[in-house]
Image: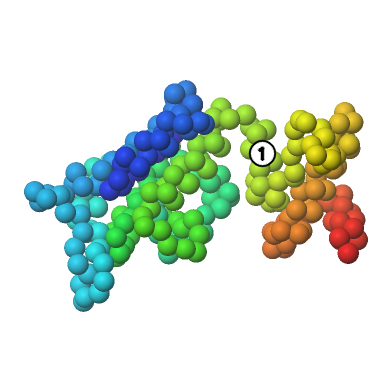
Amino acid sequence: MKIKILTLFPDMFNEFKNESIIKRAIDKGICSVECIDIREYSLDKHHHVDDTPCGGGAGMVMAVDVVARCIRANTSDNSHIIMMTPQGERYSQKKAEELKKYDELVILCGHYEGFDERIRDFVDEEISIGDFVLTGGEIPAMVISDSVIRLLDNAIKEESHEDDSFSTGLLEYPQYTRPIDFEGKLVPEVLLSGNHKNIQRFRKKEALRRTYLKRPDLLEKYNFTKEELELLEEIKKEEI
């Protein structure tokens, strides 16, 4: 997969591309991450990329001509173009699973007061990472890139993400490692039993418990198995 990030601040991505899973995925050739400076597509000598809003108002607005030139120069028929904006669709694990199927993602980062409205004609979709406003789209672009790259084949072991929170529709079950006893807080005995059937049941039940207690809204659209419904009833009685 190719990921191209159109930004006014390409240096913000230096550490992002050179650490941990992202660096390993790039080094393995699983993906590439290219940061393109939008300022390079400004035609005036001062490389202006914005102007005052028509009709008046505070702040500056990113110019459609500059951004359009940048998009056209860095996309092809295979590109899926995303605008990062608080007005976009709320990002989710399901969306990350959808985006990993594209050969090339192009992520447009906004800044200042926002985009000229006509820029929306040049993108395929708009995404928001939450109901809040940041100074620019760079951090959200990192969020999108990170969440998609880790899902690519061989970026990490498949079993490392298949039970992640939201991947199954539930929050992830609690995890433990050594020491077994830390200041009197013990690893649940079932996890040390070697009985894989019991361990699987424990993890399923605790994933349901976490979701029931922390994100009950997720259960409203979850497709329960018969066993899961029985486990949920157990949990409800235990939590009374």
Q: Point out the image quarter for the N terminus.
A: top left
Q: Secondary structure at mark 1?
A: loop
Q: Position of residue 6 (x, y in %)?
A: 31, 46
> Of all residues shown, which one is farthest toward the bottom?
55
Q: On the rendered structure, is 190 left or right of 97? A: right
> Of all residues shown, which one is farthest toward the top?
28
Q: On the rendered structure, is 50 left or right of 175? A: left
What amino acid is found at the position of numbered circle 1 in the picture? Answer: Glu
Compared to 152, does 44 lie above or below? below
Instruction: Determine the residue positioned at 91% across, 61% down.
Output: 237
Label 1 packing within 10 angstroms: few (<14), some (14-19), many (20+): few
Q: Point out the image quarter for the C terminus.
A: bottom right
Residue 60 lies in what quarter of the image? bottom left
Q: Position of residue 21 (x, y in %)?
A: 52, 31
Compared to 96, does 215 lie above or below? below
Instruction: Determine the residue positioned at 50% across, 59% down.
Output: 130
Compared to 24, does 85 lie above or below? below
Residue receiving disc 1: 162
